[in-house]
Amino acid sequence: MLRIHFTPQDLTRIQVASAPDPLWEIACSLHRLQTSQGRWAYADWYRETRTTLAGTQLGAAVRRLLVPVLPRARYLPDFLTPHEAADGLDRGLAAIVDTPPERVAHEIRLLDRSSGAPDWAPRLLDREAREDLAGLLRAYHEAVVAPHESRILATVAAERALRGRDALAAGVDGLLAGLSPAIRWRPPVLHVDYVEDRDLHLAGRGLRLVPSYFCWQSPVSMADDTLQPLLVYPVHGLRAPTPEQPPDASLAALLGRTRAAALQSLALGATTSELARFLGVSVPTATHHTTVLRDAGLVVSQRHHNTVLHTLTPLGAAMLRANPHQAPRPGLAPRAT
């Protein structure tokens, strides 16, 4: 159990990441390759990744270099998931390269005591070796994570919209209480199902919440309590676009004023009931429209309690930007298509 202790100041300094953290997605995706737990939720990604890596130099390097330093274990070196990655992969990789050798040596010793560090790990004290590792992390991201970026972005955008609605409806209590089944808010302490028993005192530093596509069930935090506090947690209840669905057939079904209006109204997110009221249609009809939009890869749907929140995917947002006058104004949509 991880117990995160909040002060009144910390409650005003909670942030929800606006985009996926690329280095945490790398780490968590490597964990998905190391276990069969939750594999059903990533089945298409797992099959594609195995095919991409099988028999390649990249696949061999992942097994020999990345998995040993980012194991699915109680401890991960913090310098491999720096705070700077919040600003993108380039900033995160640069921070890894710039890590002071003394810190690298300390964290490698911790890794060795926890699950065993590879024999070559001490070489990471040299900047050139860290540059090589950063290059490998980039290659892995480009081959394994980036091809699924649209789905990952849509997942995090939907989660962020949902957390925002919780915060508007019930304040900080609503935000923290709805994060995950593995997280329970008992003010002023956030109780997290964790790999070890520890207490994290925020002491006015706030907490950065990082929703993750590849994180499965168990949230993750930094091992060093002196670093900027964060909590990486799994996004749950997601209904993503079906990857096997050919988009062209579904996109053709979008022709018509009602569905165009539906797409426009989801720009800021809406529940099925809200969408039905906006369009002037029944809830089952609104559900049909969101199903077509979701199958076309234009929206993502996430269940929360007894409602379903729909938000745009990057593809859906791009379609609105390309066709800013496509959708009619509210109240002008016909009742059926």
Image (cartoon, rainbow, N blue to C red):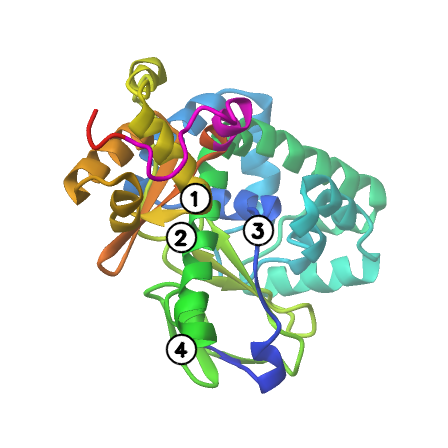
Magenta-drawn segment: 317-333
Is 326 one of the magenta-colored residues? yes
Numbered mark located on residue 185 in the image: 4
Q: Are marks 4 and 1 in contact (CB under 8 Å)?
A: no
Kindly identify the amino acid type of the residue bearing the numbered disc 3: Ser
Task: Report helix, strand or loop for mark 4.
Answer: strand
For the residue marked with disc 1, what is the amino acid?
Thr
Question: Which residue shows up at 15% across the image and 40% down it?
Answer: 284
Q: Quadrant of the N terminus?
A: bottom left
Tell me if residue 282 is in the magenta stretch.
Answer: no
Would you name the residue on which mark 2 appears?
235
Where is residue 73 drawn, in percent x and y?
48, 58
Closer-to-camera residue (105/229):
229
Q: Which residue is label 3 attached to? A: 18
The residue to which callout 1 is attached is: 155
Crowding near the residue tagged with mark 2, few <14, some 14–19, many ≥20 C-alpha atoms within 10 Å: many
Kindly report the distance in space between the C-alpha atoms of the residues bearing marks 4 and 2. 17 Å
